[in-house]
Amino acid sequence: MLDPMPGQQLLRHAAHYLGFLSEAVAVLIIAGAVFAALWQLTRGLLTRSRSDAEIRLNLGRSLTLALEFMLAGDVVRTAVAPTWDDLGKLAAVAVIRTG
């Protein structure tokens, strides 16, 4: 018979998987945004109906959203088992995001 996981260990595993899921969502958002921007650029070049500024704005919004998901994953992991290295990385990402 297996012993149940202590609560702290279970929380660490949950935080790890939630952080991974959050970063996976960020990757999917970035991939979708890149393909959408390429599609809009190609279509805009053929029909001359879409401006480059609008494509950049849409891509920038998607990248900002993806960065929020990445930051969320880092926050979740750091909240459970913070090390100085983790805190430094989190601080760097937060400063970049704020800037």
Image (tube, rainbow, N blue to C red):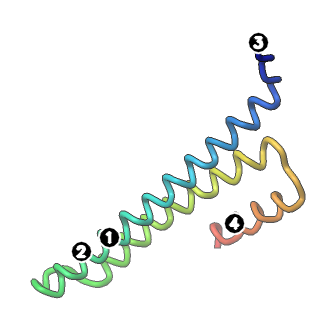
Question: Can you say which quadrant of the picture contains the C terminus?
Answer: bottom right
Residue at the image position 85 percent from the left and 49 percent from the top: 82
Specify the label residue 1 is tagged with: 3
List x then y, in percent, for residue 77.
Answer: 73, 47
- Foreground mark, 1 or 3, reads 3
Give the Cα distance between marks 1 and 4. Answer: 25 Å
Residue 51 quadrant: bottom left
Give the Cα distance between marks 1 and 3. Answer: 50 Å
The residue wearing badge 2 is 39
Which comes before the other along the chain, label 1 or label 3? Answer: 3
The residue wearing badge 1 is 35
Which comes before the other along the chain, label 1 or label 4? Answer: 1
- Foreground mark, 4 or 3, reads 3
Specify the label residue 93 is tagged with: 4
Residue at the image position 69 percent from the left and 66 percent from the top: 93
Q: Amino acid at mark 3?
A: Met
Answer above or below: position of 40 versus 82. below
Give the Cα distance between marks 4 and 3. Answer: 43 Å
